[in-house]
Each structure stands twice: as C-alpha cells, then as structure tokens.
Amino acid sequence: MNRNGSRIPETSTTAVDGTRAVPARRRLIGAWVAVALIPVGVVAAFVIGGALAGEDPESSGIAVIVRAGIIAVSVMLIAPVAAIVLGEGARRRGARSATIPLVIGIVTAAWAVIVNTLPLLLASLLGG
C-alpha cells in the first residue's frame, strides 16, 4: 500500500517532453467514468442516428442511412474507446484492476461495430 492507503502505485515519472505523466489512479478513475458513460453514448447515438436518417428510414436513400449510421457509431464508440485508452494507460502504470474497464471497453466497441455493420454486410451479400 502507498501512503494514501491505495494499492495502486503512485507514479511520478516524467514524460519525454518534460511534462508529468498522469498517475495510474487518475487514469483508472477516468476509465471507470468512461464505462459509466457508455449507456449515455448508446442513447445519444440512437437519437442522433434517428434524427439524421429522418422520420422514415425506409424512404431515405442508402447514402443518408449510411452517413447517419457512421456518425451514430462514431458517437457510440467515444466512451468505449476512452475506456480502452485510459484503462490500458492505468494498467501499464501498475493498476492491474484497470483490466476490467479495458475489457468492457473492448467488448462494447466490438459489439457496437458488429451490430451496426453486420446487417449492411448481410444485406449486400444476400442481395436484399
């Protein structure tokens, strides 16, 4: 344990450019905040995607739907990517518990990409 009673090591390393590196604890907290914001990103992605696709997605052109889908998936990926980056940074600085938000971010990001691209791929392969 360190002087604050935490098992996460406090690093006071200096980056190459002379700035102080962010300690593992701060990155770990950021990773968990990013995990907590994943549902917010999913809801925001649905709202934004629906608004950009229009009221009736069936009458919208394929270009509009693809553009709306790309923007919606990008919004949905913000929190999982932040969890991945911050979790990996904390893990590299000695916080082994950062593996949990790291894995949650990876699984969520993979799920978002697969769920949103698989229907388009299957439709194009099956000619639908």
Image (tube, rainbow, N blue to C red):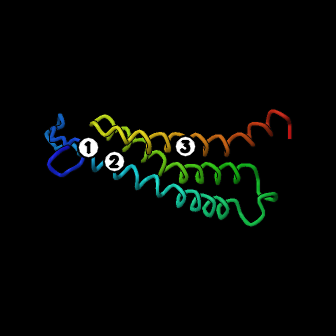
Tell me the crowding category of disc 1: few under 14, some 14 to 19, or many 20 or more residues within 10 angstroms, Cα based.
many
Which residue occupies the extreme bottom position in the image?
55
Left or right of 17, for residue 75: right
Q: Amino acid at mark 1?
A: Ile
State the SS at label 2. Answer: helix
Percent from the top left, x then y, of residue 80?
Answer: 49, 47
Percent from the top left, x then y, of residue 66?
Answer: 68, 48
Q: On the rendered image, what quadrant is the C terminus found in?
A: top right
On screen, residue 88 above or below 77: above
Q: Nearer the viewer, mark 2 or mark 3?
A: 2
Percent from the top left, x then y, of residue 17?
Answer: 17, 37
Question: Residue tagged by mark 3?
Answer: 109
Q: On the rendered image, what quadrant is the N terminus found in?
A: top left
Q: Nearer the viewer, mark 3 or mark 1?
A: 1
Q: Are marks 2 and 1 in contact (CB under 8 Å)?
A: yes
Residue drawn at x 55%, y 41% as measured from the top left: 107
Question: Residue tagged by mark 2?
Answer: 28
Percent from the top left, x then y, of residue 119?
Answer: 75, 43
Q: Amino acid at mark 2?
A: Leu
Question: Residue tagged by mark 1?
Answer: 8
Q: Are marks 2 and 3 in contact (CB under 8 Å)?
A: no
Q: Nearer the viewer, mark 2 or mark 1?
A: 1
Quarter assignment of residue 48? bottom right
Residue drawn at x 65%, y 61% as measured from the top left: 52
